[in-house]
């Protein structure tokens, strides 16, 4: 097993994934976002010290945090998109993708990927732990197309480990000071290759708490006609 996979497995033993819906948890996430984005100087200061927007409240929004020793150290925001709820932040900036949704495909928009700056030097592979969340979500929700709106310097990681490709060149993104490009991946086509390279992205039977209890989103999201949903 490659060294990185071993490191991720060891980290998973001490981590827990939590789907967050309580106001207290969400405020902790919004403050973590603010801390991370301010550290990289990509947003302006605000007196409240939080970072949130209207997409945090949409019916198809799923917040997931990575918790270690009782503290949320990383989080991502997911928007599973289908014709039932064709709403997601990246679709506002890159509306061209809506054509795929209108043709019956589903998409997963992953945004607000943050890791507490204070733990980045502790050699805990939180980037891998956090990136497992959208990968597992694509399995659970039977997603066709994965979206990643990222800065140019972050794109190589997505290409190397998850098989993403550049779909749309960088554009200005609401509330952010730096432009964002859109990467996409045909996850059903890429899944086996991703798991062959980095098997820890997938479900790990030996560590039951390494999976995520995603909400079903009944009546809000519907899998495409190309396959059936499978739980992560």
Image (cartoon, rainbow, N blue to C red):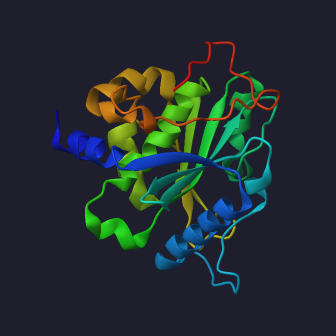
Q: Horizontal and vertical percent for residue 135?
A: 48, 35
Q: Is residue 204 above or below residue 111?
A: above
Q: Nearer the viewer, residue 85 or 95?
A: 85
Picture residue at 21% right of the left edge, 41% below the top: 6
Quadrant the N terminus occupies: top left
Q: Nearer the viewer, residue 112 or 90?
A: 112
Q: Nearer the viewer, residue 63 or 196?
A: 63
Is 44 on the left or on the right of 186, as rendered?
right
Q: Horizontal and vertical percent for residue 105?
A: 68, 24
Picture residue at 42% right of the left edge, 25% below the top: 191
Q: Extreme front residue here?
A: 70
Is 140 on the left or on the right of 40, as rendered?
right
Is 19 on the left or on the right of 41, as rendered?
right
Total marks shown come to: 0
Q: Would residue 134 be visible to someone looking at this image? A: yes
Is 130 on the left or on the right of 83, as rendered?
left
Query: Which quarter of the picture shows residue 207?
Result: top left
Q: Is residue 142 above or below residue 5?
A: above
Q: Horizontal and vertical percent for residue 202?
A: 40, 30
Q: Horizontal and vertical percent for residue 20?
A: 64, 51
Picture residue at 48% right of the left edge, 60% below the top: 70
């Amino acid at each position: 097993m490659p060294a990185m996979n071993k490191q991720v497995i060891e980290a998973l033993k001490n981590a827990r994934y939590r789907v967050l819906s309580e106001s207290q948890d969400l405020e902790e996430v919004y403050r973590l976002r603010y801390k991370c984005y301010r550290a990289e100087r990509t947003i302006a200061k605000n007196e409240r010290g939080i970072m949130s927007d209207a997409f945090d409240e949409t019916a198809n929004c799923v917040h997931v945090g990575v918790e270690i020793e009782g503290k949320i150290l990383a989080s991502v925001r997911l928007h599973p998109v289908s014709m039932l709820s064709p709403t997601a932040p990246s679709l506002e900036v890159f509306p061209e993708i809506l054509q795929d949704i209108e043709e019956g495909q589903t998409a997963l928009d992953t945004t607000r990927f943050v890791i507490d700056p204070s733990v980045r030097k502790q050699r805990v592979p939180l980037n891998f732990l956090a990136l497992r969340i959208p990968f597992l979500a694509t399995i659970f929700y039977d997603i066709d197309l994965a979206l990643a709106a990222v800065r140019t310097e972050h794109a190589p990681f997505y290409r190397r480990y998850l098989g993403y490709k550049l779909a749309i060149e960088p554009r200005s993104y609401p509330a952010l000071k730096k432009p964002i490009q859109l990467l996409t991946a045909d996850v059903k086509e890429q899944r086996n290759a991703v798991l062959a390279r980095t098997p820890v992205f997938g479900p790990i039977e030996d560590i039951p708490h390494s999976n995520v209890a995603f909400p079903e989103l009944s009546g809000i999201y519907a899998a495409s006609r190309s396959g059936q949903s499978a739980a992560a």
